[in-house]
Amino acid sequence: MKILIASDMEGITGVTNWDQVTPGHPEYVRFRKLMTGDVNAAVRGVFEAGANEVVVADGHWNGSNILIEELDLRARLNNGSPSLFSMMQGIDQNVDGVFFIGYHARQGSQEAVLDHTWSNTCVANVWLNDLIAGEYTLNAALAGHFNVPILMISGDQTVCAQTTEQIGALETAVVKQATGHFSADCLPPDVSQNLIEAAAQRATKNLMKKTAPKPFALKTPINVTVELNSSDMADKATLMPGVTREGLQLSFQADDMLKAYSAFRALVLMSYPR
Ligand SMILES: [Zn+2]
């Protein structure tokens, strides 16, 4: 049994501002260590439950945040950027289940630490077949393309609630109660990481008992709409073939989630300000 741990940083234990998750800032050094700790807790839970393979995807910023020298010896790490599947690097039909560790709520959420969707610079909103999407939606739908279910999530209470509502009855580990975009009531790592480990263990056991949520597969073809933050961004992204524009909203249709995911990423990359 093989688990992919897809990790991000904004929903890691103790994180409440961008300095803590931005390479080059002195605070970042501490929080990389905490990110590695949250991921390791999930790895422990998986192996305690009896799975035999774990691959970790480092999905924040440049994909080089987790301290490999401190990573649980039983795991492997997909590190670096860009990679074919970005936050979900390592996903394929041989993966049995996916964990989201350190995730955050979608752009525009209340009581949600560092809520955004893919790029806080460029993206205001994303819809997949009229479903408002967070990063968890995009990544769950990509896993669904390979018929792989999402089993657990860790982050603040808001991302856990949003994901459970959209994707199904995942196991959750709430490591902080967000009170705003830049504020939360945070558990210390020794406490939050025990929660993550226990949720990871339950999630893996659910899979073994066949009581885990079903894969989150979207109906194809997939209609994608991306609302950008400004018209100069929309001007640039409109150059992409097959895209129609209405104001700041750009739409396209993709045959399947694999194509939708990569076209979405390309569109956002094109839209970045110079
Ligand atoms: Zn991130």
Image (tube, rainbow, N blue to C red):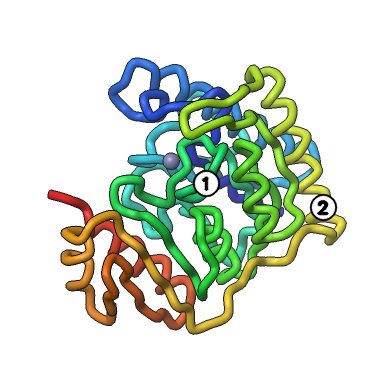
Element carrying mark 1 = loop
Q: Do the residues labelled 2 and 1 touch (CB within 8 Å)?
A: no
Give the residue at mark 2: 206
Percent x, y of residue 177? 64, 30
Q: Is residue 105 above or below residue 259?
A: above
Q: Residue at x 28, y 23 (%)?
A: 24
Q: In which quarter of the image is residue 48?
A: top right
Q: Mark 2 vs mark 1: which is more N-terminal?
A: 1
- Foreground residue, 32 or 234? 234
Tell me where residue 250 appears, x and y as whole percent.
Answer: 31, 71
The residue at label 2 has a CB less than 8 Å from ligand 1: no
Q: Which residue is drawn at 53% across and 28% down?
A: 36
Instruction: Name the residue type under label 2.
Output: Asn
Image coordinates for residue 4, horizontal then vertical, percent: 59, 50
Q: What's the amino acid at mark 1?
A: Ser
Residue topped by disc 1? 109
Numbered circles on residues, count: 2
Under 8 Å from ligand 1: the CB of mark 1? no
Q: For the residue carrying disc 1, how many other residues have a C-alpha within 10 Å: few (<14), some (14-19), or many (20+)?
A: some
For the residues labelled 2 and 1, the Cα–Cα distance comes to: 29 Å
Q: Can you give x and y, in whole percent of width and height, for residue 105 in the image?
A: 54, 46
Which one is in front in this view, the residue at disc 2 or the one at disc 1? 1
Local packing at callout 2 (Cα closer than 10 Å; few below 14, some 14-19, many 20+) is: some
Q: Is residue 224 above or below residue 124?
A: below
Q: In this view, does 72 lie above or below 115?
A: above
Quarter of the image where ligand 1 sits: top left
Image position of 139 (left or right of 253): right
- The residue positioned 32% from the left and 51% from the top of the image is 82
Helix, strand or loop at mark 2: helix
Residue 252 occupies quadrant = bottom left
What mark, if any, has residue 38 been given in the picture?
A: none
Residue at image position (72%, 54%) is 1
